[in-house]
Image: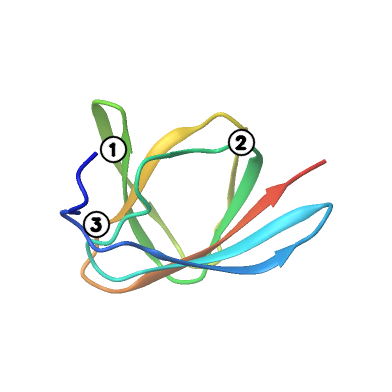
Amino acid sequence: MSLFRARPPAVPSVLVDDAMVRITRWDFEPGADTGHHVHGLGYVVVPMTDCRFLIEEGPESRRVDLAKGAAYRRDAGVEHNVVNAGSEPMAFIEIEYKR
């Protein structure tokens, strides 16, 4: 794997990590991404700003716009890269449930 990235990295800040949940705030400048990853836990995402996502899932990609305060849930096993496809900074809270 290359040491160079084409996009700036999103910045995670772990807010809570206990026996029940891990809560992480993700901050993205325009064009920033999480990097490809696999979710080992089910999770909920709550946007703190309006979010313009580019979701890269293997060879496929799709755009998803979510309003501030909206929420969605996904099961463990999701593989993707999340990119800020907008022109403004964006942030969301990710709540991973361990039980």
Q: Residues within 10 Å of mark 2 (few under 14, many from 20)?
A: few
Residue 26 location, x and y as percent? 48, 65
Q: Which residue corresponds to mark 2?
A: 40
Q: Is residue 62 above or below residue 33?
A: above
The residue that appears at 31% across and 55% down in the rendered structure is 33
Q: Which residue corresponds to mark 1?
A: 62
Q: Residues within 10 Å of mark 1 (few under 14, many from 20)?
A: few
Q: CA distance from mark 1 to mark 2?
A: 22 Å
Relative placement, left or right, of 17 versus 81 is right
Q: Amino acid at mark 2?
A: Gly
Q: Do tag 1 and tag 3 residues touch (Cβ < 8 Å)?
A: no
Mark 1 lies on a secondary structure that is strand
Quarter of the image holding residue 51? bottom left
Q: Which residue corresponds to mark 3?
A: 85
Residue 79 is labelled as: none
Relative placement, left or right, of 76 versus 83 is right
Residue 88 location, x and y as percent? 27, 73
The residue that appears at 76% across and 54% down in the rendered structure is 21
